[in-house]
């Protein structure tokens, strides 16, 4: 057998790459995990807020203890448990020009509109089997913009804003660009329930996401190199050569590419990636969604609110020296989350009378190693998904962005990482047999 530096190289140390590396190392293979940034985690990014020392997650955080089975498996395995979010005491959502200060923000005059719209969405969701890949199902008439799909139910303004806010939070891009399938598939993955869709992700990984990711990456047999961007992946008959930005050449018998889909075209692949991968990457599933934090005075106690924009969701995360630390979701094209005056204007609409002391968020769209934020299903991408997931000779592909189940979630990243490791393991076993 041709001698290579490692059995496998995994490119990217987010949850997908960490899972793939751990599974391969557990299978007895030597693994090199190459990460471009100076930290692990990728789109989970645990830091501290604006010199306060308060721990915050600038990326993925919330998980469902009942519906995220892959996360649950890992949480149990490493014994990290769950952290709770603080209980909500006050509400303030803005839909159709009305302010709702209750946990069920439905205008009494729009109850029939709400019922009709919910039926429309849930009827579409009921067509799908959550255990089968979406692209193998009857999806085509639903691969239209969410705004068009919702208009079919003719919702009243507050009802439309309520449904839009849910999908905007998940979707991170305008409702005219996001496929109706993004909202529908998420509902399917949450047991065909609107309530689960909104409320299921109620817990956090105990001790923060790195408490789970660190032991995965620390599995014996994994060599980790940070600050090592990969620029080229060259496949030959017996081996793959990976070139780093510093032009170091490393060989392996197989590679898991675990970078976000938006970053696929930043790496030169020889031979070129298949057409589905190139088209899927060009559709940019990584969105402009952003989660940021603000330290706010005069906020209602333990507040939660939603709106159709520019703030899609805001919730109190902690109290700090008489002020509230709130997390909020928006899009980088709607709001500069590091501009205090702009954040003040946006948040005071949700929390009248509040004063923003400081704010901070991470712009995932200008970050070269994500080139976008959490992923969604843009119109037209589903027809490419099977080809985007498909291995190519000695390459397997992993990321939440192409997961079969909970696409765009940490759960999807873990699912996808395990699936890619299993595929690569078969490639390695087969090539070992052939060379015997
Ligand atoms: C703001 C925000 C909020 C979110 N909220 C939630 C939530 O509450 N719950 C939830 O479940 N999910 C949430 N998500 C989604 C979740 O965080 C992601 O889907 C998941 O973490 C993606 O994991 P991944 O491994 O597929 O990709 P990533 O985490 O992006 O990992 C890819 C890795 O590849 C590296 N890389 C890129 N290019 C190269 C290169 N050329 N060479 C080497 N390395 C490279 C990157 O640095 C990165 O570490 C959120 C995401 C964001 C951004």
Image (cartoon, grey):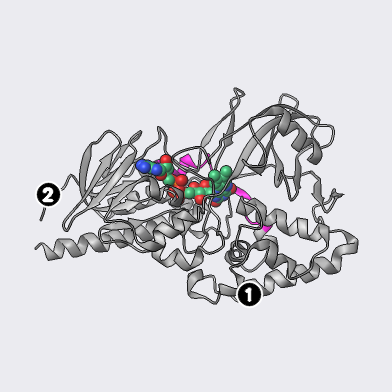
Mark seen at residue 69: none
Category of crowding for the residue at label 1, using alpha-carbon neighbours closer than 10 angstroms: few (below 14), some (14–19), many (at least 20): some
Does the beta carbon of the residue at mark 1 sit less than 8 Å from ligand 1? no
Relative depth, front residue between 247 and 224: 247
Residue at (65, 51) in percent of width and height: 169
Residue 46 image point, x, y percent: 52, 36
Relative depth, front residue between 150 and 104: 150
Instruction: Say what secondary structure mark 1 lies in.
Output: loop
Residue 274 image point, x, y percent: 35, 61
Is residue 162 visible in this depiction of the protein?
yes
Residue 28 image point, x, y percent: 24, 53
Magenta residues (range): 198-215
Quadrant in the picture for the C terminus: bottom left
Considering only vertical position in the picture, is 217 above or below 70?
above
Residue at (75, 37) in percent of width and height: 346
Quadrant in the picture for the N terminus: bottom left
Instruction: Say what secondary structure mark 2 lies in.
Output: loop
Category of crowding for the residue at label 2, using alpha-carbon neighbours closer than 10 angstroms: few (below 14), some (14–19), many (at least 20): few
Numbered circles on residues, count: 2
Residue at (81, 30) in percent of width and height: 298
Mark seen at residue 3: 2
Left/right of residue 18 with respect to residue 25 in the rendered view: right
Check if residue 203 falls in the magenta segment: yes
Check if residue 272 falls in the magenta segment: no
The residue pinned by badge 1 equals: 126
Relative depth, front residue between 414 and 291: 291
How far is the residue under mark 1 from the one under mark 2?
52 Å
Relative depth, front residue between 131 and 180: 180
Based on the displayed image, in which of its 4 quarters is residue 215 positioned? Answer: top left
Is residue 205 visible in this depiction of the protein?
no
Left/right of residue 159 with respect to residue 66 in the rendered view: right
């Amino acid at each position: 057998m041709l001698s290579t530096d490692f059995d496998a190289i995994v490119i990217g140390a987010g949850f997908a790459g960490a899972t793939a590396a751990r599974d391969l190392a557990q299978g007895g293979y030597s693994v090199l995990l190459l990460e471009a940034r100076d930290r692990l985690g990728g789109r989970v990014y645990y830091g501290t807020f604006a010199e306060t020392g308060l721990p915050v997650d600038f990326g993925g955080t919330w998980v469902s203890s009942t519906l995220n089975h892959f996360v649950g498996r890992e949480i149990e395995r490493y014994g990290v448990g769950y952290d709770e979010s603080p209980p909500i005491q006050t509400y303030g959502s803005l839909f159709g020009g009305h302010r709702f200060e209750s946990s069920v923000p439905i205008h009494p005059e729009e109850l029939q509109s709400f019922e009709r719209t919910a039926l429309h969405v849930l009827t579409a969701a009921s067509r799908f089997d959550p255990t089968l890949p979406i692209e193998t199902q009857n999806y085509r008439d639903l691969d239209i913009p969410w705004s068009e799909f919702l208009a079919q139910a003719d919702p009243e303004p507050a009802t439309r804003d309520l449904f839009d806010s849910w999908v905007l939070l998940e979707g991170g891009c305008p409702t005219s660009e996001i496929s109706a399938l993004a909202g529908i598939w998420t509902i399917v993955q949450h047991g065909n329930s609107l309530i689960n869709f909104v409320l299921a992700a109620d817990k956090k990984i105990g001790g923060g996401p790195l408490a789970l990711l660190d032991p995965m990456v620390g599995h014996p047999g994994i060599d980790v190199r940070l600050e090592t961007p990969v620029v080229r992946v060259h496949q030959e008959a017996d081996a793959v050569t990976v070139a780093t930005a510093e032009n170091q050449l490393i060989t392996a018998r197989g590679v898991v590419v675990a970078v976000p889909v938006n970053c696929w075209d930043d790496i030169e692949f020889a031979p070129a990636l298949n057409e589905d991968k190139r088209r899927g990457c060009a559709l940019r599933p990584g969105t402009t969604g952003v989660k940021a934090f603000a330290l706010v005075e005069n906020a209602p106690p333990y507040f939660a609110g939603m709106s159709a924009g520019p703030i899609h969701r805001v919730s109190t995360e902690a109290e700090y020296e008489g002020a509230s630390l709130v997390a909020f979701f928006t899009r980088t094209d709607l709001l500069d989350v590091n501009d205090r005056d702009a954040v003040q204007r946006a948040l005071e609409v949700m929390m009248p009378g509040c004063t923003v002391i400081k704010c901070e968020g991470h712009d995932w769209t200008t970050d070269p190693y994500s080139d976008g934020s959490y992923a969604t299903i843009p119109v037209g991408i589903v027809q490419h998904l099977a080809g985007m997931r498909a291995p190519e000779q000695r390459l397997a592909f992993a990321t939440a962005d192409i997961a079969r189940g909970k696409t765009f979630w940490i759960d999807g990243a873990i699912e996808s990482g395990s699936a890619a490791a299993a595929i690569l393991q078969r490639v390695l076993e087969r090539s070992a047999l052939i060379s015997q």
